[in-house]
Image: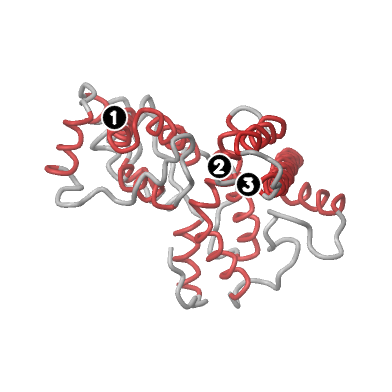
Amino acid sequence: MATGKLLVGTAVAAVLLAAVLTTQHEPSPPSPSSGHAAASSSQGWSLLALGGGDEDGERPSPAQARPARPPQDLMHDLFTEGSLREASLDGDWGRWTGEQLMPTLALRRRFDQLLTTVGEASLPELRDLVAWLSEQDLGPQGAQAVLAVWDRYVRLLQHSFRDGADPAQPQRWGMALAEHQRVRREILGPAWADAFYREDEAAVRQLIERSPSAPPRTDHTQSWIGAPPAGVTDDAWHHQRVAALGPEAADRLRALELAEADWQHRLEQARAQLQKISSAPELSDEQRAQLVERQIHDRFEGADRQRARALLGL
């Protein structure tokens, strides 16, 4: 989202916090088997819930009651006769290298547009539609990569966050942001979480730092993601995060950061070795290719090899 010139009045703080951190922005779409949600509720996806049931809560929604539609029929129903009529498909799938789907905010925009139709369509129907559409553009493997991100994104939207971003409690904004950052990275992975939420998180950090309603930046209002502040040891930083976030969350956050640091270290080592290989005049093209492949094989495993090749431009 474009932040523009941030205004820091109470009303603006309420709007921005609701847009970026509350369930209205990061909603919880109901599972296909879930019951109804009250249509009058203000909690995000409940306005688009699969249910709209009777007083005992057992009557299924139209999307649940009807047989699943083929993707072609669903596309017609949504974009010709439904809520997305006269609209075009938003965003895009991102760049598929043939081995890896590169993270992009445009994919989240596409997902979000389709998820606004929950109620007209069930989540399984939408998943089939995503598979059908992405396979046309990216092929079968590319479509599987898109679906993997879709499944993680829907799981993130169904997550119940502990810390709400109440505009009336600015002292808790930093903790709410930290929880959202941590959960996003745990579920989506660091690269996809950064692509999907970097701009949103930057806007909230600016709001926290600039709002006159918020207290000065302290260990309670700072982001708990990343390296410790200057003068704070790693152990002290971990203890602070345990106190603020709880031991389980702090341990997961530390493990995530250690894994990411290890990945970056191995990637930089591989990049340095590849530069040496490419500039060695005594090597033939075949020898260079063999040495490059050995570097990738020795430093990375499984799907990380594909990711490393993409990031190293191989």
* Quadrant placement of the C terminus: top right
Give the residue type that dot 1 points to: Glu
Coordinates of residue 284 in the picture (x, y in percent): 64, 38
Give the residue type that dot 3 points to: Arg
Residue 291 image label: none
SS of the residue under disc 3: helix
Discs 1/2, front: 2
In the image shown, does 36 or 110 lie closer to the viewer?
A: 110
Label 2, residues with CA under 10 Å away: few <14, some 14-19, many ≥20: few
Q: Earlier in the sequence, mark 1 or mark 2?
A: 1
Residue furthest left in the image: 81
Q: Earlier in the sequence, mark 3 or mark 2?
A: 3
In the image shown, does 242 or 172 lie closer to the viewer?
A: 242
Coordinates of residue 72 in the picture (x, y in percent): 18, 31
SS of the residue under disc 2: loop
SS of the residue under disc 1: helix
Residue 125 image label: 1
Give me the C-alpha separation between circle 1 and circle 3. Answer: 30 Å
Residue 314 image label: 2
* Quadrant placement of the N terminus: bottom left
Please name the residue shown 53% across and 64% down the image: 167
Label 3, residues with CA under 10 Å away: few <14, some 14-19, many ≥20: many
Q: Residue 226, relative to residue 266: is it above or below?
A: below
Please name the residue shown 79% across and 63% down the image: 229
Q: Earlier in the sequence, mark 1 or mark 3?
A: 1
Residue 182 image label: 3
Give me the C-alpha separation between circle 1 and circle 2. Answer: 37 Å
Q: Are marks 1 and 2 in contact (CB under 8 Å)?
A: no
Coordinates of residue 7 in the picture (x, y in percent): 49, 78
In the image shown, does 141 or 14 lie closer to the viewer?
A: 141
How many marks can you see?
A: 3
